[in-house]
Image (spheres, helix red, strand yellow):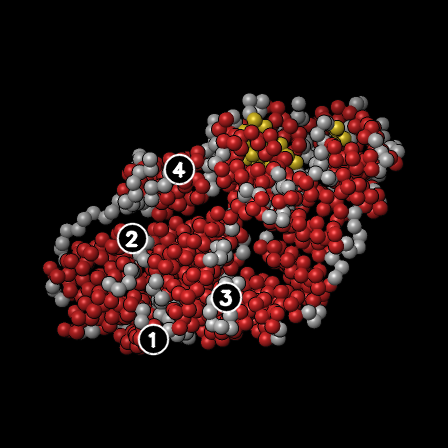
């Protein structure tokens, strides 16, 4: 097919195709107004890719609410490849292909229904496309991408960004609208044809006078489809025939006028037949034929439409020559005709795999409340949930609520839709729905509590829990016996308001009320263990010994649940009470569970807490890997509070690693996203103060650490954000010993109340810095003994560094050598570079020779993605294992490893393991 006036665009697509053939994965978005030539370019690309496997899909406006409809169309021809995939991917893809209603009643009937979460779908699609590409170069063409359903869009964009070293090309064609956003993917914007090219195209329509052609080219602004269609419906004998078109009109209006005009000469039965096709979307021809027959119309009624070029009939389906024809056909019909068409299509969708289509056709054919249709939509929403179609799920629930007559049930369904819309990031729309639910709930306590629970969750996501705090407390107080558990769940969210401002007394009060509602016997309630976990947290923060006992009592209860965040939440409390091994067990359980079901919210939640744990136990490089993945997950969720929390964690990790610039950048972003969240600010200030202290910038350290310390005055537990000892040390370094003693007095009192070994050791270290003469040595000795009771190697190394500095200043050169060397080894093994520099400087001042610095990679050399892959490889994981973890193809993982080797100057995995200080064995 010869394309007029698109030489540059055709050349770019051909170059991308050649790169894909050579094994370099590529993707591109073609953007432009309707009729600008996007589909023609896709057709051209399909023609020149005759040596490739070409698969296509097109978005349809009606099907934008059918989860994974476009994706299923695209991957259908590749299904023979499924048998080559690992079982976990094959099961997910089979679930997508066979959406059997009979499986709804029992998820276990579907082999992977529970596993087909959003990320599980992403991973399976990536595996399918890369495996198919390994057989033969693969070209995926997605037309009208602005209309493909959200689940398909997310999966395809996710895959497109990860095809770096696979022989595959993905091309999206979309109108220039915000509905389809593809950051990070090359965009080719199509403009109108030049006057010369427009006249060439008009020549295909017959003998159009030159002046008319020039005028029409200007009026259509060079839109190819308009240039081809308007001559069919406008008299073009002279320029006067265009007199009604006095200025360039929006192309969509011009084309719709042209297409609508072509319908005028058709009979009512023919127009009705086309209307059924327009409403059917990409339904199979058999479904369309059944619907037409129910209306007393034969399939032959479509012949005139086919002859006129409006539709094309194949053995599989009826397709419109252009989406605007479908829109024109649907728009010219009256409401009654549309309802009739959808009702006929609903009756024609008899196959179990068409259950979602049937539900939506019924919804489009229904005017007033209809519980049967609403129930069908709820089932559709559940199927969408199981396959990661979050927007489709929310839309189905919202429409189900609209068709629900009973007010309280309608409010309940609205709240269900709100929960999903919130997870999709549509907070403004969710809050509008909540206003409706509140009116419908009336005096029904259960419904009001459910609605308030959603409002509380919104407040958490926006970082404004205080806005609703009083309302939550008041509503929970009025809950009846049958609503106590629901009220307790709702009220537990209210703890975020006082906790965000470090008001521990208020936090403890709320959590005590939650426990009274959900577990009045004082033991963790298996139906809601988070109530007890949160009370344990509040008690620990308040310095109450009962908190540690309650936390340990929660372990067995939380482990009996499907991973839902309770274990990770409990792990945070266990970390504060220095039970690090048990905390790791809890966090690892939730992270593994999140990966298994593709729950990215739970994954990010667990990774953030595990990064904090890895810092405590002296493994900041491992913490960095977790924090990077956490940040990637947070970005995918697109919720400001989640992103801010991930950046605060990265600021802490990079502070320990001694990367001051990175720490400052992450801290700045966290504060920008949540400027009023005091909890985030404290963690960020602590990170900035710690990196300043490690870098010898005492005054800066005092400023940042003092701000954090001031905000934490109501917190008794000293291990939450362990700022006190660092502030005391910074004050000593800048010559303010009296202030340092006052800080240490408060720390000593907190240690006495909680018995934290690590904080006691840090306090003794700082007391040694303040002491003089013979009192210094015993304090350091006592501090090191206290370090022996808890696994915090970096804290122990800091005490050794301070002891060595004191010994060196006391002219005890030989005695200073041992603690300084030991400190240096710990700092370097942990990549805590600024602390390592201090230890190495002290040894240099002593005049003692030190070993060369470990040949470790500078983190800044590698991109975050490269660093995660390099770190995983250094731990002994195979490329296939890494690919499954980071959701990339094996080829792309090897591509990134090649870049890592080049940047680091190594040539093997053995050298990489050595450079990262790993002790892992090479994978077999």
Alpha carbon distance from label 1 to label 2: 31 Å
Q: Is residue 441 visible?
A: yes
Question: Quick check: 315 left or right of 820?
Answer: right
What residue is drawn where x is 52% and y is 44%? 120
Is the N terminus in the top left, top right, bottom left or bottom right quadrant? top right
| Residue 489, image x, y percentages | 55, 66
* Dot 1 alpha-carbon crowd within 10 angstroms: few under 14, some 14 to 19, many 20 or more: some
* Label 3 residue SS: loop
* Dot 3 alpha-carbon crowd within 10 angstroms: few under 14, some 14 to 19, many 20 or more: some
- Residue 525 numbered mark, or none: 3
Alpha carbon distance from label 4 to label 1: 49 Å
Instruction: Choose between 906 and 394: the one closer to the eye.
Output: 394
Alpha carbon distance from label 4 to label 2: 25 Å
* Label 1 residue SS: helix
Alpha carbon distance from label 2 to label 3: 40 Å
Question: Quick check: 543 left or right of 314?
Answer: left
Is the C terminus in the top left, top right, bottom left or bottom right quadrant? top left
Alpha carbon distance from label 4 to label 3: 43 Å
Counting the numbered discs, the total is: 4
* Dot 2 alpha-carbon crowd within 10 angstroms: few under 14, some 14 to 19, many 20 or more: many
Question: Mark 4 highlights which residue?
Answer: 879
Q: N-terminal of the two: label 4 or label 3?
A: 3
Residue 227: name its quadrant.
top right
645 in relation to 232, above or below: below
Residue 713: name its quadrant.
bottom left
Q: N-terminal of the two: label 4 or label 1?
A: 1
Question: Mark 1 highlights which residue?
Answer: 753
Question: Mark 2 highlights which residue?
Answer: 830
| Residue 277, image x, y percentages | 77, 36
């Amino acid at each position: 097919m010869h394309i007029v006036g698109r030489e540059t665009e055709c050349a770019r697509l051909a170059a991308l195709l050649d790169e894909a053939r050579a094994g370099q994965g590529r993707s591109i978005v073609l953007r432009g107004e309707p009729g600008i030539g996007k589909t023609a370019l896709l057709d051209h690309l399909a023609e020149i890719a005759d040596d490739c496997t070409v698969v296509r899909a097109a978005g349809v406006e009606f099907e934008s609410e059918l989860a994974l409809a476009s994706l299923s169309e695209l991957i259908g021809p590749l299904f023979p490849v499924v048998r080559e995939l690992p079982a976990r991917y094959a099961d997910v893809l089979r679930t997508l292909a066979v959406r059997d209603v009979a499986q709804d009643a029992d998820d276990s009937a579907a082999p992977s229904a529970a596993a087909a979460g959003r990320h599980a779908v992403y991973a399976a699609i990536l595996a399918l496309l890369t495996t198919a590409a390994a057989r033969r170069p693969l070209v995926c063409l997605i037309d009208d991408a602005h209309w493909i359903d959200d689940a398909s869009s997310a999966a395809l964009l996710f895959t497109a960004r990860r095809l770096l070293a696979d022989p595959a090309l993905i091309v999206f064609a979309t109108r220039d609208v915000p509905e389809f956003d593809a950051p990070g993917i090359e965009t080719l914007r199509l403009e109108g044809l030049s006057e010369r090219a427009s006249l060439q195209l008009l020549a295909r329509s017959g003998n159009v006078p030159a002046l008319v052609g020039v005028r029409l080219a200007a009026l259509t602004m060079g839109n190819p489809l308009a240039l081809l269609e308007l001559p069919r419906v406008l008299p073009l004998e002279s320029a006067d025939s265009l007199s009604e078109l006095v200025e360039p009109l929006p192309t969509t209006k011009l084309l719709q006028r042209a297409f609508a005009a072509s319908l005028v000469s058709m009979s009512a039965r023919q127009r009705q037949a086309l209307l059924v096709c327009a409403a059917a979307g990409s339904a199979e021809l058999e479904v369309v034929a059944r619907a037409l027959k129910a209306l007393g119309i034969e399939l032959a009624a479509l012949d005139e439409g086919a002859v006129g070029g409006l539709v094309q009939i194949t053995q599989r389906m009826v397709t419109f020559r252009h989406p605007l024809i479908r829109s024109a056909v649907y728009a010219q019909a009256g409401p009654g005709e549309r309802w009739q068409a959808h009702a006929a299509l609903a009756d024609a969708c008899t196959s179990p795999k068409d259950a979602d289509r049937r539900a939506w056709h019924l919804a489009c054919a229904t005017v007033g409340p209809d519980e049967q249709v609403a129930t069908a939509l709820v089932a559709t929403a559940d199927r969408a949930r199981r396959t990661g179609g979050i927007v489709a799920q929310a839309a189905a629930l919202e429409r189900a609520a609209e068709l629900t007559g009973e007010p309280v049930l309608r409010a309940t369904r609205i709240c269900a839709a709100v929960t999903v819309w919130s997870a999709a990031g549509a907070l403004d729309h969710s809050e509008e729905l909540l206003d409706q639910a509140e009116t419908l709930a009336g005096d029904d306590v259960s419904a009001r509590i459910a609605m308030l629970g959603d409002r509380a969750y919104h407040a958490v996501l926006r970082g404004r829990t205080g806005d609703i705090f009083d309302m939550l407390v008041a509503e929970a107080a009025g809950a009846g016996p049958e609503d106590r558990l629901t009220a307790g769940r709702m009220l537990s969210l209210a703890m975020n308001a006082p906790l965000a401002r470090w008001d521990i007394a208020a936090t403890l009060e709320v959590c005590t009320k939650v426990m009274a509602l959900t577990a009045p016997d004082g033991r963790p309630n298996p139906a809601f263990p988070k109530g007890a976990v949160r009370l344990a947290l509040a008690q620990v923060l308040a310095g109450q010994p009962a908190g540690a006992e309650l936390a340990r009592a929660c372990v067995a209860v939380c482990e009996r649940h499907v991973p839902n965040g309770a274990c990770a939440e409990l792990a945070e409390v266990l970390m504060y009470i220095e039970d690090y091994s048990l905390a790791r067990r809890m966090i690892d359980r939730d992270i593994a569970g999140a990966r298994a079901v593709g729950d990215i919210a739970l994954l990010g939640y667990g990774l953030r807490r595990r990064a904090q744990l890895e810092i405590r136990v002296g493994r900041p490089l491992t913490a960095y890997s977790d924090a990077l993945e956490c940040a990637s997950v947070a970005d995918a969720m697109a919720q400001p509070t989640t992103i801010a929390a991930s950046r605060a964690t990265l600021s802490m990790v990079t502070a320990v690693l001694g990367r001051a610039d990175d720490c400052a950048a992450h801290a700045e972003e966290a504060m920008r996203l949540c400027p009023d969240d005091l909890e985030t600010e404290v963690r960020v200030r602590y990170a900035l103060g710690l990196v300043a202290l490690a870098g010898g910038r005492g005054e800066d350290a005092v400023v940042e650490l003092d701000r954090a310390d001031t905000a934490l005055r109501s917190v008794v537990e000293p291990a939450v954000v362990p700022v006190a000892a660092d502030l005391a040390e910074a004050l000593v370094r800048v010559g303010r010993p009296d202030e340092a003693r006052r800080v240490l007095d408060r720390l000593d009192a907190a240690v006495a109340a909680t018995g934290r070994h690590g904080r006691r050791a840090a306090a003794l270290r700082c007391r040694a810095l303040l002491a003089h003469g013979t009192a210094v040595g015993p304090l350091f000795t006592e501090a090191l003994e206290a370090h022996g009771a808890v696994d915090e190697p970096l804290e122990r190394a800091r005490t050794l560094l301070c002891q060595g500095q004191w010994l060196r200043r006391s002219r005890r050169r030989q005695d200073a050598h041992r603690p300084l060397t030991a400190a240096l080894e710990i700092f370097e093994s942990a990549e805590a570079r600024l602390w390592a520099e201090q230890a190495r400087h002290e040894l240099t001042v002593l005049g003692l020779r030190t070993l060369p610095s470990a040949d470790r990679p500078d983190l800044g050399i590698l991109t975050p993605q490269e660093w995660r892959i390099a770190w995983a490889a250094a731990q002994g994981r195979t490329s296939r294992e890494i690919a499954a973890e980071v959701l990339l193809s094996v080829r792309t993982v090897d591509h990134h490893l090649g870049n890592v080797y080049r940047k680091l100057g190594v040539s093997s995995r053995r050298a990489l393991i050595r450079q990262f200080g790993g002790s892992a064995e090479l994978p077999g």
